[in-house]
Amino acid sequence: MFDEVIEVINSCSTFLITSHARPDGDALGSELAIYHMLRDMGKDVVVYNQDKTPAVYEFLPGSKDMIHFLDSVDGFEAVFVLDCSDIERVGDEKDKIGSIEKIINIDHHASVGTFSEILLVDSTASSTGEIIHRLMKNMGVTITEDIATNIYTAIMTDTGSFRYSNTGIDTFRAVADLVEKGADSRQIAKNIYETKPAVQIRLMGKALDTLEFYEGGRVGSIYVTQKMLQNEGALSEHTEGFVDIVRSIDGIEIAIFYYESSKDLFKISLRSKETVDVEKIAGKLGGGGHVNASACRVEGSLKAVKEKVLGAIRTVCNTL
Ligand SMILES: [Mn+2]
């Protein structure tokens, strides 16, 4: 599994690195970890994301070097597509990116796309960052403080600070190594969790006003519309983590967050606490993810979208 990836890294000298639209901590930390590693090896490297880096992740070493406009992909010998189960997820430039000769897909999603021949996928890993740490150990490269900070952030954010069931013994072994290599766990936690702008908390208040329960309190949802964003002067990135507030309620087994990305189009985040497989629910609606965290997009009015999602939940979880 590692050999093929290592072969490409050693034989090529110009690389593009990308991940999904609306990048999260795992996407950004994974990209920047690979970026630093390749640069340290003397390679030419460009990191491209369709969307700009959310302010909360700007502390990540290398984040200022990322670009958000992709002119031509001529000259790139290989591309790393990270944390993406499908090339569609990189956004509008998927065709250009998909035309690069060598595509390396490193991911931990259960539903694996077939867009790449060079795969490093492990659905039991906590995060793409954890797989990248494994790759680097395998290669024997020096894990610098910059690399350690990026991978630690990737793992910490995708495990909800080591609380989710994707957190395994290997995860703790990896983060122990990263702290040893210079990742400052306290400072990273502070940067991610204790720097929220006031506008985000105000939007959260409005979102919590929409809290509804179904199935005797086992399913709960909140939503944010474009109008709510405008009223508060908030951005879509300010909704990050909202679904986890619903999950934190006692008795909740499935948490839903509806985000109106444009008129009659909703991005839906689903979370579960225990054994409910929300990946199956998202799958019914054309999305994907993991057992405890998944997402999908559904068209229609808020009322119609809610009915569709609740319908899918009732179909998948007939014991609820
Ligand atoms: Mn991830």
Image (cartoon, rainbow, N blue to C red):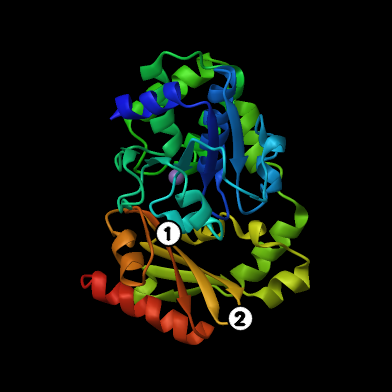
The secondary element bearing badge 2 is classed as loop
Q: Nearer the viewer, residue 78 or 105?
A: 78
Mark 2 = which residue? Answer: 263
Do the residues bearing badges 2 and 1 touch, measured as CB atoms within 8 Å?
Answer: no
Instruction: Identify the image quadrant of residue 57.
Output: top right
Q: Please, what secondary structure does the residue beneath circle 1 have?
A: loop
Q: At 32% across and 29% down in the image, what residue appears?
A: 4
Q: Nearer the viewer, residue 141 or 209?
A: 141
The x, y position of residue 19, in whole percent, is 51, 46
Residue 134 visible somewhere in the drawing: no
Residue name at image x 57 percent, y 45 percent:
73
- Which dot marks residue 228? none
> Which percent across, then down, holds residue 291?
32, 54
Give the number of the mark in front: 2 or 1: 2
Q: Amino acid at mark 1?
A: Asp
- 148 versus 66 height, above or below: above
Q: CA distance from mark 2 to mark 1?
A: 33 Å
Mark 1 sits on what residue?
A: 250
| Residue found at the far front of this picture | 74
Disc 2 crowd, CA 10 A, few/some/many (<14, 14-19, 20+) = few
Residue 159 vs residue 266, the one in the foreground: 266
Going by the numbered disc 2, the residue's amino acid type is: Lys
Q: Measuring from the top left, give residue 144's x and y in whole percent.
A: 57, 16
* Figure quadrant of the C terminus: bottom left
Q: Quadrant of ligand 1?
A: top left
Q: Quadrant of residue 149?
A: top right
Q: Which is nearer the N-term, disc 2 or disc 1?
A: 1
Q: Nearer the viewer, residue 177 or 164?
A: 177
Q: Quadrant of the N terminus?
A: top left
Number of labels in the image equals 2
